Amino acid sequence: MALLNALKGWTPAQKSVVTASFLGWSLDAFDFFLLVFVLKDVASEFGVEKKQVAAAIALTLACRPLGAFIFGRLADRFGRRPILMLDVALYSLLGLATAFAPNLTVFLVIRALFGVAMGGEWGIGASLTMETVKPEARGVVSGLLQSGYPTGYLLASVVYAALYNTIGWRGMFMVGAVPALLVFYIRRNVPESPAWSAERARISIFTVLRNHWRIAVYGILLMTAFNFFSHGTQDIYPTFLQVQHGFDAHKTGTIAIIYNIGAILGGWIFGTWSQSAGRRRTIITAAALSLPVAYLWAYSTSMAGLAVGAFLMQMCVQGAWGVIPAHLNEISPPDARATFPGTIYQLGNLIASSNAVLQTTIAENDGENYAFALISVAVAAAIAIATLTAVGREAREVKLS
């Protein structure tokens, strides 16, 4: 209902911007999360250990800040719309190229380059959206936009559950070329941001960072905690289900579908609530609620218990994340809004990029016990998010256009 109310009075162009940004992030995440379902299969084909393939996830995350900076500066200089089209085309091409990797080295190089392209999409899409929509709709749209991430994970879950046994891991990455079709939609329907100015974009990013270094440091710390929270609860969870519980592709995919539905609902609910309750209070509440459900999520012994725990956990995780597109844009300097939020977000990703290797190593050293690796990271990240958010500032009423 809140989403429908927020859409009242919108122009077709505003609706198209939100649609394109949502789909861009969804399909970006879809390409990324295909890998988390096939870690052990890729490892088996290339004759290496799972943690060596998990390094591909780390490389993707580590290269995202570079993409956020490069594509963000291009979007600040040449406009959000043309660079968004370029970015979507590039990550789609690299997703397809993954299917043809002949060995682990080439596979890792392709996923690193994919990380560069993936890193550019979020900052451009978020700035284009927040600069275009009505101020009173930011909270709702923030939750909707961020729910694109679990929507992409959900799509990957469906593809894995339905098609993996037929097309294998390489075929799954061939499906990753589909997002390229979004470029045609953007070209036809999406206008340039009303807040973008070519003259203002000439300001040096180093000048911006020098003038706003405190908020930059704070944002990097906050997004490091956020990325450990999301990737620490998502990236190796399918491996945990497959290895520790012996679930096949159908059961693993089914649970992934269930917890991604929870993630989507969490983004919508908490993002909407943040418009009235405030960004900081909403983030703290979502992070705190994850603590009571962590044990059920990591230590349940039945499929039903794991599904319920995972649903609730991802509702909390993406509930906190649902506020971030609006919150980061609101606290960012206006003369580098395509660069600043995306780069801050992805620098946090860089620091947290070791998560998959870290958790996989902890589990393997503990007799394939993934439960402890999962819960320790999730709880620590939730506490860090609540603490950092509490000392931050609220900027819900700031003008973006």
Image (cartoon, rainbow, N blue to C red):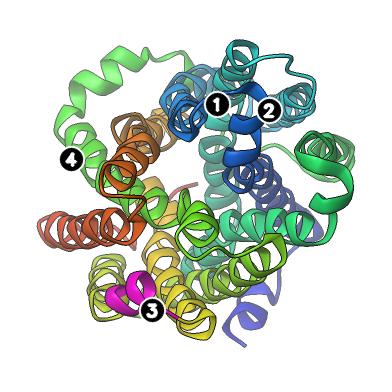
Seen at 54% across and 71% down, the residue is: 259
Residue 231 falls inside the magenta stretch = no
What residue is shown with label 1? 115
The kind of secondary structure element at disc 3 is loop
Q: Which residue is mark 3?
A: 300
Question: What label sits on residue 245 in the rendered view?
Answer: none
Dot 3 amino acid type: Ser
From the top left corner, tell me how far across and down residue 155 is, in percent: 72, 57
Q: Nearer the viewer, residue 129 or 265?
A: 265
Specify whether 204 is left or right of 50: left
User: Which of the pair 365/203 is nearer the observer?
Assistant: 365
Which labelled disc corresponds to residue 218? 4
**Disc 3 and disc 1 in contact, CB within 8 angstroms:** no
Q: Position of residue 54 (x, y in %)?
A: 47, 33
Amino acid type at mark 4: Tyr
User: Which element type, helix, strand or loop, lies under badge 4?
Assistant: helix
